[in-house]
Amino acid sequence: MNEPLRIMSDLILSPGRERSLRRGHPWLLSGAVAGAPESAEPGAWVRVLSSAGEVLGFGHYSPHSSIRVRLLAFGKEDPGEALLDERLAIAIARRRNHPLLGGSDALRLVNAESDGLPGLVVDRMGDVVVFKFLTAGMHVRAERIARKVEELTGAPHGYRSRDDHSARRESIPPDEGPLWGDPPGEVMIDERGRRYSVDFMHGQKTGFYLDQRDSRDLVEGLSAGRRTLDVFSYTGGFAVAAGRGGAASLVLVDSSESALARAGENLAANAVGCPAELRRGDAFEALRAASAAGEKFDLIILDPPPLARSRRSVQSAARAYKDMLLHGLRCASPSAFVLAFTCSHHVDPDLFQKIVFGAALDAGRGVNWLRTLGPPADHPFSIHHPEGRYLHGCLLEVEPGGESIP
Ligand code: SAH
């Protein structure tokens, strides 16, 4: 892999297009660019200038993406490539001994824009550090980044996980494989006493949804004696938490056979003793069938994949979220707790609340919103980059009285 060219190119903005940069937003869209550097290679370190010639900042060039530059530095001074090492050290140090991040050997070490490192995601999973290089800029610096993270963490193994979506967007190869050490096929993590086996090579994302850690804690504290339904269970993140918290029974629903197989192993690894049923199939159909059959649950988790992948699909996604909630609420017993999530950043918190309330009305259930839920402190979003806010959730409590409200 090539180290990026140190020959810096200039990129000039169209008049009036520097506003978002002045507010510290790290993305420069292709439409804002008046003059592109002809010689700059994908991933090159570029200097961004206003139409009047003022130097505004420095960043990584992505000639094939509609996000043409990700800025890493603002202002006139070129911090150079050493900036990358500094940012990695800060991101990793920030999470060490953090009061909100204790008790887990699985953490996100670098969360892209919110750590000043657009295009880079680094997750520690026990002995293995899993990387996603999501932009041309991070792709060409992969080896250097891996070396630095190895040095900073002392972890025995490093692994590069592929990301086909960003590889297409950036025209970079969807590489995957070991970066150092000899990564085993899977790794066991310990998240506040919950033990999960993680397939970081073939699993979704980097193998495990670290962003739901705090909500899993919540579920563990809520589940005692409750019949629990974990919809979109993946490898049983929530189900294991509910089981450890003393759930009366567990039903897991997911369309992925391999995810459910691992969920079964995870329940066993945590010595979850209550009856557990794994239902493979479409979650929307499974919810409809459960509500039609009159099944009731006292704790329900609804954690779907991103249903709106673009702004255009928000309407249809809103209908799907509402359908999920409507049928979920129909399966809720009096006083049930329901946790529902969206991880589509196009669905904002206001819209999500409207969907929840609309579904409760249609289900004829009185519902209180007890808590707003979101990602833990290793997945922050920067005030300069609101697009990084993607995971919204709520803890609902269904009215104790009866099955319906007037
Ligand atoms: N709750 C999980 C993460 C859920 S990710 C955790 O905390 O670990 C979303 C899951 O939904 C994936 O496992 C995926 O296989 C599953 N999925 C996607 N579409 C589905 C559908 N239509 N029906 C059932 N499962 C689906």
Image (cartoon, grey):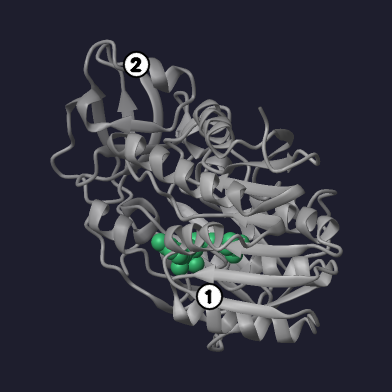
Find residue 249 and report its horizontal and vertical position in percent: 74, 72
Cβ of mark 1 under 8 Å from ligand 1: the answer is: no
Q: Is residue 88 visible?
A: no
Q: Is 130 positioned to the left or the right of 331 in the image?
A: left
Q: Is 19 positioned to the left or the right of 404 in the image?
A: left
> Label 1 amino acid?
Arg
- Residue in front for this viewpoint, 60 or 231: 231
- Residue in front for this viewpoint, 70 or 283: 283
Position above or below: 309 against 23: below
Q: Is 226 positioned to the left or the right of 80 in the image?
A: right
| Residue that sits furthest to the left in the current view | 38
Q: Is residue 228 visible?
A: yes
Q: Earlier in the sequence, mark 1 or mark 2?
A: 2
Find residue 73 and report its horizontal and vertical position in percent: 48, 34
Which image quarter is the N terminus in? bottom left
Q: Please give the residue where the numbered disc 1 appears in the rendered image.
A: 279
- Residue in front for this viewpoint, 299 or 139: 299
Cβ of mark 2 under 8 Å from ligand 1: the answer is: no
Q: Residue at x 46, y 48 (%)?
A: 81
Indicate the quadrant where residue 3 lies.
Answer: bottom left
Q: Residue at x 67, y 81 (%)?
A: 266
> Label 2 amino acid?
Glu
* Picture disc at residue 102: none
* Picture disc at residue 54: 2
Q: Secondary structure at mark 1?
A: strand
Q: Residue at x 69, y 71 (%)?
A: 250
Find residue 352 and report its horizontal and vertical position in percent: 53, 33
Q: Secondary structure at mark 2?
A: loop
